Amino acid sequence: MINMITTILYALLAVVSLAYLADYLLAWNDDPKEPPRLRARIPLIGHLIGIIVNGPSYHSVIRNDETTEIYTLGILNYKLYTSVSTRLLPLIQRQSRALSFRPMIQTVARKWGDANDETDRLFRETDLITEFSHVMKTSLAPGPQLDEMNMRMAQRALVDLDLLLGDGKDKKTKLLEWARFAITQASSCGVYGNKHPFLDDKVYEAFWAWHAHLSAHISGINFDILSHGYHARAVVFAAHAKYCTSIPPDTSSLFLSRWQCLLSSGLSVSEASKQQATLPIGMLSNTVPTFFWTIYEIFSRPALLSSIRSEILTFAITTSGPRHILNLTNLKTSCPLLLSTFQETQRTRHIHAAIRKVTTNTLLDSGKLLLKEGNYLQMPGHAIHYSQSTYGPTARDFVPERFMDPNLKRGGADFLAWGAPPHLCPARQFAATEILILVAMLVVRTDIHPAEGTEWEEKPGLEFADPVTVLNPKRDVEVVVRVRGEKQGRWEVEMGDGSRASRVPLASG
């Protein structure tokens, strides 16, 4: 028995020694100009474990020097260059070919869109990605096309709010579950038209079942042994194939332009419909948790809730008898506290690391920094958003007025909630408008408090496995929704002044 234990201990010692030796040898080949390595306590896989365990805060935990702008995390034989500097961002942006986002899009098309070999070749070897990105930006730019999407989305949002509040009685509901349903239905009406695939409960449930497996599917580390995620994806694919055989006249220019781009680039109808089925991933994945946390941050602060309610009632709503009208233009441009609170929620809750593949050896900062081909570069928003050198001594605090105060407000490269320029989320205006509408309606028409007790949990647990920019709560929150009697009646939405109706003045631009 003693001999067996001794043998096991020697074997473990040998494995650990080999791991440290391998880690040392991999670092031996580092160029002096490469960003310095930050050593993990566990060789080879320590940083990977740290990211899994600590989630978005890992970069803040491991970084012990606020002056360090970029460093290297060694994970097995790969290097993950990590830039936490807003100074370096413009230099990185100028190297868009060498530090490319294209491989990420190609991976999504292959792993999530199930691209066959020919479709994969088109994404890799033609201008499809460039043209695809162009039609996305054009279709979602402020203007009449976006206004049409916003109006369909807003009208559906009112339907789901009326369903929630219809009988005027207190109602218990799970906040994340309701947020997911309301955002899915409103967004889908805006993008697909009023007869969209997610009206079918089976398709709706299948999408979110597939969504739970997205990280595993794209990483290749797939624990989906029984293929539940792939079976769910097949349901979503089939629904989109059916939708694409007879695209309704009220579909958005976004959906139609993507469809035409895919077909004209050489994709078959079946392959194009599969790629279209990945659209709701970008449409819903981040909007849902951002909406959830904006509600959470506002309703858990009574004084803030009262101020935002007063602001919306004063500047964005008119009442005529039993009719209440929400003016979208005024909601976007004349409710700065609501907008600031929404963006502060994004800043404090954002965890995404914008990532690029190094496609060729690249020198940055007048030749002082070298990034080697085949590795990856990431720019974690959390580290920048929580940096005191960027956001001052209150960087780790939730300050609702931050984006109203010129002494506190930062924007552009300092605010990465919508991505790192030039690769900003093209749907940011649509998503921001949707969240502002739903939050405004809840603020004005309801009081919401936790069903268990009266206090909102200060730091709810987070679900780190989701491939999102804002993490979902680990456990849903059951709340009581109480209708505010003075705002019962018929609710409508109007676009307002057409010259400024489409744009939300976001800090990111």
Image (tube, rainbow, N blue to C red):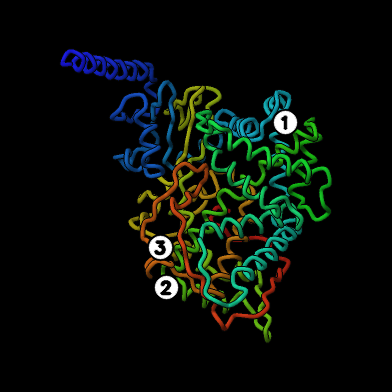
Q: Amino acid at mark 1?
A: Asp
Q: Which mark is residue 127?
A: 1
Determine which quarter of the picture holds residue 396: bottom left
The residue most toward the bottom is 321
User: Does residue 33 appear to the left or right of 230 in the view shown?
Assistant: left
Q: Earlier in the sequence, mark 1 or mark 2?
A: 1
Percent coordinates x, y for residue 333 in the rendering: 60, 67
Q: Earlier in the sequence, mark 2 or mark 3?
A: 2
User: Does residue 303 appear to the left or right of 466 in the view shown?
Assistant: left
- Residue visible at 75% across and 47% down in the picture: 255
Residue 141 seen anywhere in this rendered image of the structure: no
Q: Earlier in the sequence, mark 1 or mark 3?
A: 1
Relative to 211, say whether 292 is above or below: below
Q: Amino acid at mark 3?
A: Val
- Residue visible at 50% across and 25% down in the picture: 362
Q: Residues within 10 Å of mark 1 (few under 14, many from 20)?
A: few
Which residue, given by chain and number where applicable, does mark 3 sit on?
399
Determine which quarter of the picture holds residue 43: top left
Q: Amino acid at mark 2?
A: Pro
